[in-house]
Image (cartoon, rainbow, N blue to C red):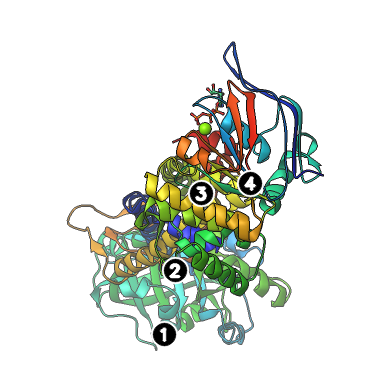
Amino acid sequence: MSLIQLDKVCKTYRTGNLEVPAVVDFTATIEAGEFTVLAGPSGSGKTTLLNLIGCLDQPSSGQVVLDGRNVATTPTRKLADFRLRHIGFIFQSYNLIPVLTALENAEFTLMLRGVPQQQRHQRVRELFALLGLEGLENRRPNDLSGGQQQRVAIARAIAAEPAVVLADEPTANLDSRASRELLELMHRLNREQRTTFVFSSHDPQVVDMARRVISLHDGRLADDRRREP
Amino acid sequence: MLIAIAYRNLWRNRRRTLLTLSAMVVSSSLLILALGVFSGMLEDMLASATEQYHGHLVVSKSGYQDNHDLYATIRDEKLPVMLENRPEVVAASPRLRAYGLLSGRDISRPAELLGIDPEREEKVTTLMAHLVAGRPLPSAAGNGALIGSGLARRLGVGPGDQLVFVTGAADGSIGNDLLRVTGIFSTGDSGHDNGLVLVGLPWLQQLLVLPGQVHEIAMRVNDPMAAAGIADRLAAELPPGLDVFDWGDLLPEMREAVASFDVSRMIVVLILYAATGLGILNTFFMAVMERTREFGILMAIGMRPRTVRAMVLLETLQLGLLALLLGGAIGLLMTWLMQRFGIDLSGQITPVTYAGGTILPRLHAAFDPVNVWMPCGLLLVVCMVAGYLPARRAAKLQPVAAIREE
Ligand SMILES: Nc1ncnc2c1ncn2[C@@H]1O[C@H](COP(=O)(O)OP(=O)(O)OP(=O)(O)O)[C@@H](O)[C@H]1O
Ligand SMILES: [Mg+2]
């Protein structure tokens, strides 16, 4: 069974009298261990789709099945716990809680899951070593570069070993070198730790690095290409 | 961890938090001081009303306080000592009372004579302390008398002069005898100054032919506000036929004044705190709105809405506790200073008599625990109520919408 199944998913926003179809009849499956990019111009529905996959939003019609669970039929209050247990999030920017240090930010999901402090710290230190963040444990997000902040966000997203990590334009605020580094890191995590990544981008340089590219246009699936590395 | 996050968030906008905190501290500490000064005024009033004449508690025959019946006497001479042995009772003074005609050189006036033991009376009331001429009654008073200043003026007598008192004695005869003025007192209460005379208890007992008997035993207790409770406990232990009255029974207007203070205290606190509460509400709404995106992210990564709510409430709770500690401490300190030193206003205003008590022309505070814990407790309540709405708002945010916001 696929990790993520999207079946004729539609999402329509209503602003006043206007209906904006953000995602239209979208059908796709994503397997565990894949490294997938949602590509498409601005307004094509990438964020909306990621929100649907991430149980942050519910489809207007169609089905989103994640790890065997139908998102539409799960009560909203259970979704927070479901997200905590199964999904890691990386947002475009200002991902981190400013009053917490890098280490505290990274261990946050583990803390919400009730993991004891010692184990949390051990796990985060491992990840910091992996992500090249050693020595930055006690810095506040404001004292980190954009790339470092995004790497802390990655640490937070993967710390609890979720089924899938969703990243909405994680490199949009980074220069091309930092973008490349971040992408290579995600690649490595995908290869070495078998972490499933789904992220969105409209940056061709980023899109080129992905193994699977799902292209969106006006909320519709325009293309779905796989490349063997 | 949540507590630490809340604490750090509280100090994120240091200036705003400090402003809100100082508003809370100022309002609560000033409130504590103001209530302390109110209590001080009330204490002065109560003291002048009770300690000048009645005492805090009075034991007498059941009907005596209504009709001052000459025959309603207490014969138990051990009773004052027994009462004094109770821990709440500071002192007890037996008294005998007579009404009659008092004559000076050539004028007569009606007067109330109170037969007392000067040493004991001194510990219960301040009558003897208001001497304006002559000397206090010696402990063996003989036929000495302390006379109110108004009465002395009307009779045209001064220290050393002789008086004649005529009254009906208990055996049906007419009692009359000579008194000698040893001193003149002036309390500021015209009723006493114009009609009261203090004489030795044995002298009056002899005149009235009531040997070893008294009409009442007046007492001073350690906490006047607790007088009613002490009275209830005492009443259960007294021999049948005797009753105990607290100052509230003897001075009903004074009791009203104290009760109205309790109500007005509550009203003042509530009005002031309504304003403070709006300030807190504003601060926390702003704090929550600014962090909309952050709450969105927290909820997206799996924080439960009720944890978000708890986090915001923890912030208000910490602010409230901090304000409470500071406000309480500063309020207590100011109250203590005001209690210790006070401000004399006798140059600006004259004493006011109200409800049988005199408000002295001074600002001074009295310590009453209620004046501290009530403002502090309510501050915390107001803080939590004002924090609840923003907290609920934060918890109700939709992660998607919250994260879209920049
Ligand atoms: N809450 C909303 N209310 C109304 N319309 C919305 C809302 N969210 C998204 N849309 C609309 O839905 C469409 C898809 O938006 P979406 O944010 O998913 O695009 P995107 O591919 O992520 O764009 P970008 O690259 O700019 O982030 C757009 O036309 C957008 O205006
Ligand atoms: Mg987007």
Q: Which mark is residue A134?
A: 2
Circle 2: element type: loop
Residue at image point 27% right, 65% down? B342
Residue at image point 34% right, 70% down? B336
Circle 3: element type: helix
Is residue B253 found left or right of A222 in the rendered image?
left
Circle 1: element type: helix
Is residue B238 found left or right of A215 in the rendered image?
right
At label 4, the amino acid type is Pro
Q: Quadrant of the C terminus of chain B?
A: top left
The numbered mark, 3 or 4, whose residue comes first in the sequence reads 4
Q: Which residue is mark 1?
A: B119
How far apart marks 3 and 4 lie (CA) works out to 23 Å
Q: Quadrant of ligand 1?
A: top right
How far apart marks 3 and 2 lie (CA) works out to 45 Å
Please state which of the two labelled residues, at mark 3 or mark 4, is closer to the viewer: 4
